[in-house]
Amino acid sequence: MMENPFVDNQSEPDESTLVWTPLCPLSALPSEGVHYVELKNRMFAVLWTEPVSEPLEAVSDEELVERLRVLDDRCPHAGASLSAGHIEEGCIICPWHHWAFDINSGKCPDADVYAVRRYNVRIVGDVLEAKI
Ligand code: FES
């Protein structure tokens, strides 16, 4: 059977190869929408689960981690940049053909063989880090 190059089968990466990596200062993230971050030739979509209305200093690191998502930026359908999309009903909507990807699981609700990888995050000082 021929492999579909656009399907990310979400095989779990070897945990020992993942390292906490600074992505960007929290202050660089706008309070809503999807943001593009490129690091070492890898592309990520960074987003808040809901718009931030309070000063970040007033929110605990634990809550910030709960409210942040880092996903692969490349749409598994045909490669669009998901950070150019928008958030709707808990999904990131691809800008090209409007496929949806759940911001928690990364899966496409209509065809969960298609998914984008979600990365663990943490806050160090005022920097967002992801385990990539
Ligand atoms: S490239 Fe994303 S839905 Fe087609």
Image: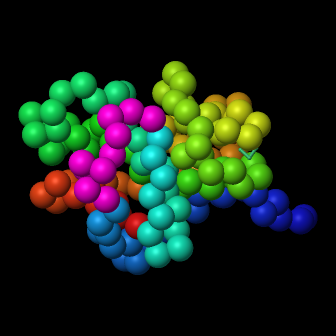
Q: Residue at x 62, y 51 (%)?
A: 81
Q: Position of residue 49 (x, y in %)?
A: 38, 32
Find ligand 1 in the image and state its quadrant.
top right
Residue 31 x, y percent position in the rendering? 32, 35
Q: Of residues 128 and 84, which is closer to you in this image?
A: 84
Q: Is residue 42 visible?
A: yes
Residue 55 image offset from top left, x and y in percent? 15, 33
Residue found 32% across the figure and 69% down from its top: 21
Front in this rendered view, residue 35 or 74? 35
> Where is residue 92 drawn, in percent x and y?
55, 36
Q: Horizontally, is 83 left or right of 51 in the view?
A: right
Which of the 4 image quadrants contains residue 16? Answer: bottom left
Count of marks overlaid on the render:
0
Q: Picture quarter containing residue 123?
A: bottom left
Question: Residues in magenta?
Answer: 24-33
The magenta stretch spans residue 28: yes
Relative to 104, 22 lies left or right: left
**Which image quarter is the N terminus in?**
bottom right
State the residue at coordinates (24%, 48%).
Answer: 27
